[in-house]
Image (cartoon, helix red, strand yellow):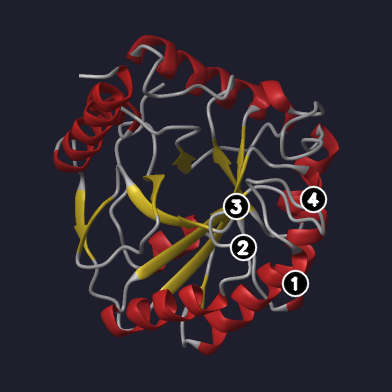
Amino acid sequence: MSTTIRQRLRNKWRRYTVSRYARRDFTLTNDVPYVSFTFDDFPRTAFVTGGRILADHGACGTYFVSGKLLGGPSPSGPIATRNDIGALIDSGHELGCHTFEHLDGTRATVAAFERSILANRAALADMLPEGDFEVFGYPLNGPVVAVKRAVGRHFVACRGGGQTFNAGAIDLNLLHAYFIDSRNRGDLDAVRRLLAANATARGWLIFATHDVADRASDYGCAPHFLEDVVRLSLHSGARVRTMGEALREMSAAKAPRVG
């Protein structure tokens, strides 16, 4: 068996086990669908451009920050600065945790992952003494079961990927998200179908991306595409909320906190 095939089988098994175990189920019973917009790594364009687009439609987003990356370069363009953190909160957006060092949960140990969560929380407290993280976004390839179990104790909810929406009995330790990036660039029909399915299920669709720029990276999207997605989300009848706001409105119980 080739190395590539073995790796694919390992990845498939990991995805299966991580979706099945260490769950924290919560049943959605809301009368209307929800949509959230999230931005990983917090490139400056996600706030300067993406935040403006959301604000133009009366909405706010959730921005997952890794403290060690602040002010530096990235494949998605320059990362936000400490000053941007304060401006983001003042604008009504939400900050989420992305680990301090932007760790891969399929490679880091549980101990290292938890230390990175606490380091990110300490970095936020240094910038915003009254700030805190309610929600978490798994960087890179997501978690293994042991990491998922540990991380879930720290946050109200944790977001992964999966390219679908959440409905019925959802897993607060590994919420689904739909990334808008090079995989679906310009494909508004796919977005329309997803929003229609989310509306029918009265589910929770969490969009995710990185930079928002005319010449977006493979991980980001163009401003006009994001604007179209926001507009279609509102037209679908969904309430567009940050992840924390959506959870509060849907009365999801808070998880115990550690650290």
Picture mark count: 4
Q: Please tell me which of labels 3 and 4 falls first in the chain.
A: 4
Q: Nearer the viewer, mark 4 or mark 1?
A: 1
**Circle nearer the viewer, 4 or 2:** 2
First in sequence: mark 4 vs mark 1: 4
Q: CA distance from mark 1 to mark 2?
A: 11 Å
Q: Earlier in the sequence, mark 4 or mark 2?
A: 4
At label 2, counting other C-alpha atoms closer than 10 Å, the crowd grade (few under 14, some 14-19, many 20 or more) is some
Q: Secondary structure at mark 2?
A: loop
Above or below, 150 against 203 in this view is above
Which kind of residue does numbered mark 4 sit on?
Thr
The residue that label 3 is drawn on is 209
Residue 159 located left or right of residue 207: left
Q: Quadrant of the C terminus?
A: top left
Q: In the rendered structure, which disc, 3 or 2, sits on the residue that comes first in sequence? A: 2
Quarter holding residue 73: top right
Q: Around disc 1, counting alpha carbons within 10 Å, would you say few (fewer than 14), some (14 to 19), or many (20 or more)?
A: some
Question: Crowdedness of circle 3 by 10 Å Cα count: few (<14), some, many (20+)?
Answer: many
Give the vertical position of 116 relative to 43 (above or below).
above
- Residue 185 is labelled as 2
Q: What is the secondary structure assignment of the residue under circle 1?
A: helix
Q: Secondary structure at mark 3?
A: strand
Name the mark on residue 224. Answer: 1
User: According to the image, label 4 marks what residue?
Assistant: 45
